[in-house]
Image (spheres, rainbow, N blue to C red):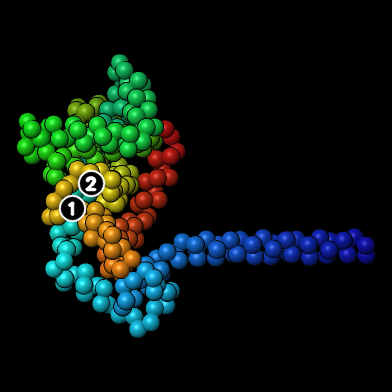
Amino acid sequence: MSSISTIQRLRTSSKVQRRFSVAWRLIVAVILIIFSIFPVLWMISASLNPTGSLATQKLIPDNPGFGNYRTLLTSGQFPFWVWFGNSLKISIITSLLSLAITTIAAYAFSRFRFRGRQTMLKGILLIQVFPSLLALVATFLMISQMGDVIPFLDLDNHTSLILVYLGGAMGINIWLMKGYLDTIPREIDEAAMVEGASDWQIFTRLILPLLRPILIVVAIINYIGTYGEFVLARVLLRSNEMYTLMVGLQIFAGAQFTQRWGVFAAGALLGALPIMIIYLALQDQIVGGLTQGAVKG
């Protein structure tokens, strides 16, 4: 009888421990969800607040409405759609160009063996250690002087901004792409070479289709990084019609930030929609690309 009672006590203790474990995990999960969602709810509340003032901001505004959105989209005070289009254009072009260059470079580092390969890889990684803000003044002066020789690479030009973004997006993306390429068996290349395929044919017809998950990941990382970037765009762009959305909204708020808080919140929410849609549509590919690329480096 004593052994049976002991077993029952152990089972009861085990059930209590499991319930306690589940309970504290749920508590932690709820706290994290509230911590993550609260800023979004606060922004939504601010965008619906008819007063548009930060001083009268409440989580549940009085007489909520869409007046801030109407002011944002129809008012002639600032060109919201121009800024939004500039952000989309710069982000898409930067993502596509960076993706093309990164994929070719990573394929060369993964499949070919040449002198200085390891040194170049370490150098690319080492450059990423230094914050880009350290080169902000040098970047400004370089673009300013290049504009004297090549007009379309001057300040207040989207082309020069895209080139600066391309230079900063290569390092970590090359390593990420190379790690994914290393997981693809080399037997595929060898079998294709036996059939007489060239390196370019192997890359475009065999390897590239297998890279779809990591291609999506790299493209999204580049897109989000450039879409939400503020400092470089603020320094290199000067005119109202050339601003990106982030720069335009910040300048619009300016010294009257507390009075234009509602319109600013509405613009921030509308600006976040493209990123949210991309994440929801491609979340499976994002997870697959990141996890598979981390298997082998």
Would you identify the image quadrant in which residue 282 lies? Answer: bottom left
The answer to whether residue 123 is above or below residue 64 is: above
Q: Nearer the viewer, residue 171 or 4?
A: 171
The answer, for residue 90, to whether it is visible in the render is yes
The answer to whether residue 60 is above or below residue 208 is: below
Q: Secondary structure at mark 2?
A: helix
Where does the image place residue 289, in percent across and percent down from the top left? 37, 46
Q: Are marks 2 and 1 in contact (CB under 8 Å)?
A: yes
Label 1, residues with CA under 10 Å away: few <14, some 14-19, many ≥20: many
Label 2, residues with CA under 10 Å away: few <14, some 14-19, many ≥20: many
Q: Nearer the viewer, residue 7 or 65?
A: 65
Where does the image place residue 33, in percent across and percent down from the top left? 50, 63
Question: Which amino acid type is marked by label 2?
Answer: Ala
Pointer 1: what residue? 243
Q: Secondary structure at mark 1?
A: loop
Query: For the point 30% across and 68% down, which residue is it?
Result: 259
Disc 2 to disc 1, C-alpha distance: 7 Å
Query: For the point 41% across and 68% down, which residue is it?
Result: 42
Query: For the point 34% across and 71% down, which residue is it?
Result: 53
Would you identify the image quadrant in which residue 57 lies? Answer: bottom left
Query: For the point 23% across and 46% down, which residue is it?
Result: 233
Query: Farthest residue in the bottom direction?
Result: 63
Residue 69 numbered tag: none
The answer, for residue 206, to whether it is visible in the render is no
Q: Nearer the viewer, residue 54 or 175?
A: 54
Where does the image place residue 236, in percent across and percent down from the top left? 19, 43
Pointer 2: what residue? 233
Question: Which amino acid type is marked by label 1?
Answer: Tyr
Q: Quadrant of the C terminus?
A: top left
Q: Nearer the viewer, residue 162 or 115?
A: 162
Q: Horizontally, is 26 left or right of 163 in the view?
A: right
